[in-house]
Amino acid sequence: MALSDADRMRIQTLREQGLGAKAIKRAYPQKQWSLATINRLCRKFDATGSALERKPVSGRPKSARTEENVGLVSEMLCSQEDQPGTSLSLRQIAKEIGLSKTSVSNIAKHDLGLRCFKRVPVQVITDATRLKRLERSQQLLRRFTATKSKCIFFTDEKLFYISTPASNQNNRVWNAGRKSDISSKRLLTERAKFSQSVMVSAGVCYGGKGELHFIDEKTKINADYYVNDLLPMLMEDCNQLLPNGCTFQQDGAPAHSSRLAQQFLEQNIADFIRKDEWPPNSPDLNPLDFHVWGAMLDKYQHLQPKPTNVTELRAVLQAIWNDLPQGPINRAILSFRKRLQACVRAEGKHFEHLC
């Protein structure tokens, strides 16, 4: 007779206590266990450590994860050599070869041992840009030691939207009835055609962060506005946080690299990174770009309820900025030289996927 899992566990427990087959049978006289069955389970436990383990060949034979299907999934899921982006999605593969998406996912994970990674958006780097990134990263490495890097005041601007881009892939509503039975308030998500936004500017350094400066709505950041309105506030933050000397950093945005801005910095600050010294197209080197703005956006996306107008958005961003911990910012600034070294090793190409 077939034994239940509970009976098998009882036999296993008694075997663990050192009892033989006859003793186990005597312990449960009310059970109609045959001595041969108990002996078989004892031998199984002695060999494998479990009386419950199934045979490797037991169960329904594979019908989806066959060798042929594994080969097909491998060919379709991974991009061909020197042809990035030629792979198909799990859903496309499932439709192509007539399997369920779950089966394709199991083949990828368990049979092929693959892991899934999100694509990272980066800026385009041409050959000319790559050479400038390489040369200027080398120059900055020679210029800034680990100690001097702590005295750099990194600055940048960022645009925050009230309605952040969101994927509806996992934003589902479960209901027992039909779709038409669901209330529109539960099912429909309103989205403005043009979301309101707020532009901010700020600077950070090792040991502190400056004020979060809000740029007037519909204001274009040209050279005049940057020099007359924004740059003086950033320099004031810089001098307060680093009174014993600092290096002012800015990227190559047109307003930053304008002759007016370069002349203003030459006349008003002891040291700054000039327009022909900062690597072009390099948000991966500025701690504000690769850490601070992302940290703020992550906190904003988890905020409930979301602001409904620009005034509320400003208040929310200010609160998030005030609460940003300094420790991660310090670690991001300490990684500046490591990122320069990574850029040099990559010969000026993208290195974000290696960090």
Image: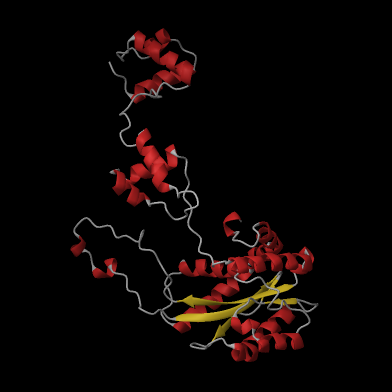
- Image quadrant containing the C terminus: bottom right
The residue furthest right is 244
Q: Residue 91 in the image: x percent, y percent? A: 33, 51
117 vs 243: above or below = above
Which residue is drawn at the image coordinates 67% and 89% (left, top)? Answer: 260
328 vs 52: above or below = below
Q: From the viewer's side, name the closer residue of 70 and 21.
A: 70
Q: Residue 154 in the image: x percent, y percent? A: 67, 74
Specify the color scheme.
secondary structure
Q: Is residue 102 left or right of residue 16?
A: left
Q: Residue 73 in the image: x percent, y percent? A: 38, 43
Which residue is drawn at the image coordinates 35% and 12% (left, top)? Answer: 37
50 vs 320: above or below = above
Q: Is residue 306 left or right of residue 226?
A: left
- Image quadrant containing the N terminus: top left
Q: Is residue 177 left or right of residue 213?
A: left
Q: Is residue 291 visible?
A: no
Picture quadrant of residue 295: bottom right
Q: Residue 306 in the image: x percent, y percent? A: 43, 73
38 vs 100: above or below = above
Q: Is residue 97 visible?
A: yes
Which residue is drawn at the image coordinates 32% and 73% (left, top)? Answer: 190
Q: From the viewer's side, name the closer residue of 302 and 97.
A: 97
